[in-house]
Image (cartoon, rainbow, N blue to C red):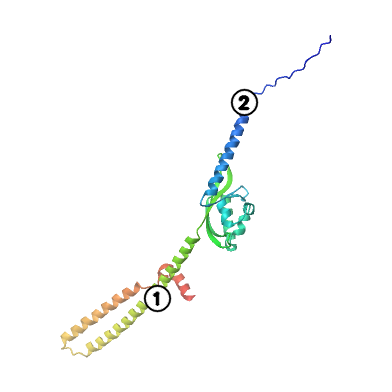
C-alpha cells in the first residue's frame, strides 16, 4: 500500500499589537472625520461668512452663508476666485492687507465691498486669524466676515449731518462776529462824540466832565468785553484743523 502525505496549513502568528495599531488608526480617522463633520455643521449654520486658506494663501473652504451671499459655487470661490467679487476700487488694498498679515502671521481686519448675489456691492468687515496645529506649525488662516453696509450708511449719514451742523454753526458764528464788529464801530463813534463833548465843556463843569469820563470808561470796558467774546468766535476749521489746514481750506 502506498502511503500519501496529507498537506496542512502552517499557522501564521500576528502580534496582537498590530491589531491595536490598526484599530487606533481607524479610531483616529473616524474622530477626525467626525470633527470635520461637526465643524462643517457649525460653520454652515453660523450667522457669519467663514473662509479658510492654506499655506499658499489660496482659499480652500467657504461656508454656506458665504456662498448664499455671493450666489456663486464653491468651486468658483476657491483659490483666488473670491476676489472676482471684490469691488475693483477695494481689491488692491484688500489683497495687500491680506498678504502682509499672512506673511507676518498676524491677525488682520479690513473692510471692502463685495458683490452680492443680486449684483449690489455691500460693505464687508472681514477678520482673519492665523491657524496653527497642536505642534505650533502654521497651517494657514481662518476668517469670518459680516455685512456692515447698514452701519456704514449710518456713519455716512451721521458724518453728513455733522458736516451740516458744522457749516450752520460756522455761518452763525460769522453772523454774530459781524454784528459784534458793527457794535464795536458804534462804540468807537460814541466814544469820539463823548470826547468832543468832554473837550467842549468848560473847566467849571466838573460834574459833567466827570460823568462823561465815567461813560467813556464804560464804553472802553464794553469794547474789551466784546473783543474777548469775539475771540471765542474763531472759525471752527481754525480751531479743529489748525492754521495751515484752515488757510488751505479757505484758499480752496
Picture coordinates of residue 205, whole percent (x, y): 16, 88
Residue located at (41% from left, 67% from top): 240
x, y percentage for residue 199?
23, 88
Residue nearer the viewer, 205 or 155: 155
- Where residue 158 appears, as percent x and y from the top left, is 44, 65
**Which sits in the foreground, 136 or 163?**
163
Q: CA–CA distance between discs 2 and 1?
A: 89 Å
* Image position of 28 with respect to 247: above or below: above
In terms of secondary structure, where does tag 2 sit? Answer: helix
Query: Residue 17: which disc?
Result: 2
Which residue is denoted by mark 1 in the rendering? 171
Above or below for 26 versus 91: above
Q: Earlier in the sequence, mark 2 or mark 1?
A: 2
Task: Mark 1: give few (<14), some (14-19) or many (20+) Cα within 10 Å.
Answer: few
Say if residue 101 shows up in the picture. Answer: no
Q: Is residue 160 left or right of residue 121?
A: left
Residue 246 visible in this rendered orientation of the protein: yes
| Quarter the N terminus occupies | top right
Tag 1, which secondary structure?
helix
**For residue 111, above or below residue 6:** below
Q: Residue furthest front?
A: 1
Amino acid at each position: 500500500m502506498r502511503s500519501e502525505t496529507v498537506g496542512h496549513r502552517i499557522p501564521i502568528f500576528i502580534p496582537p499589537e498590530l491589531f491595536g495599531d490598526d484599530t487606533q488608526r481607524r479610531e483616529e480617522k473616524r474622530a477626525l472625520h467626525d470633527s470635520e463633520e461637526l465643524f462643517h455643521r457649525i460653520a454652515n449654520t453660523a450667522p457669519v461668512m467663514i473662509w479658510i486658506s492654506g499655506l499658499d494663501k489660496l482659499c480652500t473652504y467657504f461656508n454656506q452663508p458665504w456662498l448664499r451671499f455671493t450666489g456663486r459655487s464653491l468651486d468658483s470661490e476657491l483659490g483666488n476666485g473670491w476676489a472676482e467679487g471684490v469691488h475693483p476700487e477695494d481689491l488692491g488694498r484688500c489683497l495687500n492687507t491680506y498678504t502682509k498679515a499672512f506673511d507676518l502671521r498676524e491677525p488682520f481686519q479690513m473692510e471692502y465691498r463685495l458683490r452680492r448675489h443680486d449684483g449690489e456691492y455691500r460693505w464687508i468687515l472681514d477678520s482673519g486669524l492665523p491657524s496653527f496645529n497642536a505642534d505650533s506649525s502654521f497651517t494657514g488662516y481662518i476668517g469670518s466676515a459680516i455685512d456692515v453696509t447698514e452701519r456704514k450708511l449710518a456713519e455716512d449719514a451721521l458724518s453728513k449731518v455733522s458736516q451740516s451742523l458744522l457749516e450752520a454753526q460756522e455761518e452763525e458764528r460769522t453772523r454774530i462776529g459781524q454784528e459784534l464788529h458793527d457794535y464795536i464801530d458804534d462804540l468807537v463813534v460814541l466814544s469820539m462824540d463823548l470826547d468832543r463833548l468832554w473837550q467842549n465843556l468848560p473847566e467849571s463843569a466838573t460834574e459833567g466832565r466827570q460823568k462823561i469820563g465815567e461813560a467813556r470808561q464804560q464804553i472802553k470796558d464794553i469794547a474789551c468785553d466784546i473783543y474777548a467774546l469775539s475771540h471765542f468766535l474763531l472759525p471752527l476749521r481754525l480751531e479743529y484743523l489748525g492754521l495751515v489746514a484752515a488757510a488751505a481750506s479757505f484758499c480752496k
